[in-house]
Amino acid sequence: MAKPKPPVQKNETIELAFEDLTHEGNGVGKVNGYPLFVPYGLPGEKAKVKVVKVKKNFGFGKLLEVLEASEERVEPPCDVYLQCGGCQLQHMSYAMQLEMKHKQVKDALKKIGHLEHVSVHDTIGMDDPWRYRNKVQIPVGEKEDGELMTGFYQKRSHKIIDMDTCLIQDERNDRMVETVRRIATRLGISAYDEESHRGMLRHVMVRTGQATKDIMVVLVTKTKQLPEQDKLIDEIRDAFPNVKSIIHNINSGRTNVILGKETKVLFGDEYIYDMIGDIKFMISPKSFYQVNPTQTKKLYDQALAYADLRSGETVIDAYCGIGSISLFLAQEAKKVYGVEVVPEAVTDAKKNAKLNRMENVEFYVGQAEEIMPWWRNQGLRPDVIVVDPPRKGCDEKLLEAMIDMEPERIVYVSCNPSTLARDLRVLEDGGYATQEVQPVDMFPQTSHVECVSQIVLKEAGTQ
């Protein structure tokens, strides 16, 4: 018996009522039970939609006109919002963004982890959900008249959208990029063209210290030489007297990777500094450092609360990076052991511990799933394990190593609700109970959500 065909055809224009959102923020409407996913649609709305792709069990549409608008629809303040791929939710009220992210976490726990009983708190948002990013890395292109332009790539392409401002960036990042672009144009510095592999200036990266007001600018070029280098440095410093660091990074490869291996300091220091709470951090061009320090403080405070330290505990921080969570934990723990696979990050972590005069924390290079069983064999028994893995979640062997070490508490910091739910299921089956989950909005105007989970050993939790 032939399966029924989808009730819509490609290029057909239909009226559609939206009833839900995907985890990416797309509107979901159904035609005779057949789901259509449509960017910029909101639940409760009716719209004219063009069907752009039809698959067996679902399709995709393009929003042509909103016929009945939701009260949660707002006018996006960004001029290039519909072209740029950086934000997904500017058409949605901030209250709805927070609710969407809460639902995303709750749904993932239920559908993937079968953890519908776990309490998921309301998402912690920002008082002002704009201008929060302390780091920009922006490609450079050329207009027809030879003037340089900077902007993010158009959705699903490598075409640069010419823009002067990005409303989720620190304003100093915008101004620095604009200044470099203007000076480089005047000095005749060409933009890199990835198709021909010719030209010079590939990217401009700017990092700012929210608390310290330090500014670092990184000029990424294909060539080892930077023409008019002295003039460029002088003019940047004239425009930004408080710039602390001007770096030249060389990336000569045909690659989408932004930074190359070779880095030279043209002016100032290799590092700038910033603070999260009472902890000071050194930040180099390649350091992983959270882009939203305001929300990072809330995230780390929650992780610290879930760790429930009383000054006598031993803590392991897997995926420790540059030591940011480790140092927060070290304020209240007896001893913290951090492990990280990236050697440069461990070097930075050790420098950050020294900078903050913290002697009760040690950092090791390696894979946590290999080092932790070795620590166990040496007699190390942590009271708490903290993990903050990449989007793919924890390695299966790491989850096994955590369960084998039997810490009383596990704190799981996650940037992906789906892999969090999967890993929580493994921990639950291994003798742990997920107490509660706290979503934190680290990236307003985008569909991403971070969260912290409190997990306890079932025996310890029932004593």
Image (tube, rainbow, N blue to C red):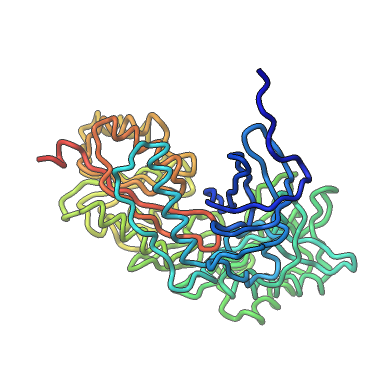
Q: How many marks?
A: 0
Residue 14, horizontal then vertical, whole percent: 71, 50
Give the camera-side residue of 20 and 17.
Answer: 17
**Residue depicted at 90% across the width and 68% down the height:** 145
Task: Give the image location of residue 441, x and y in percent.
Answer: 44, 60
Horizontal relation, residue 200 to residue 172: left or right: right
Extreme residue toward the right, this view: 145
Q: Observer-nearest residue: 274 or 170?
A: 170
Q: In which quarter of the image is residue 39?
A: bottom right
Tell me if residue 182 comes above or below residue 376 in the rendering: below
- Could you say where residue 76 lies in the image, as x and y percent from the top left? 62, 69
Q: Quadrant of the C terminus?
A: top left
Position of 400 compared to 188: left or right? left
Q: Which residue lies furthest to the left in this view?
A: 463
Q: Which residue is drawn at 62% across and 55% down?
A: 263
Rendered residue at 15%/36% (across/down): 459
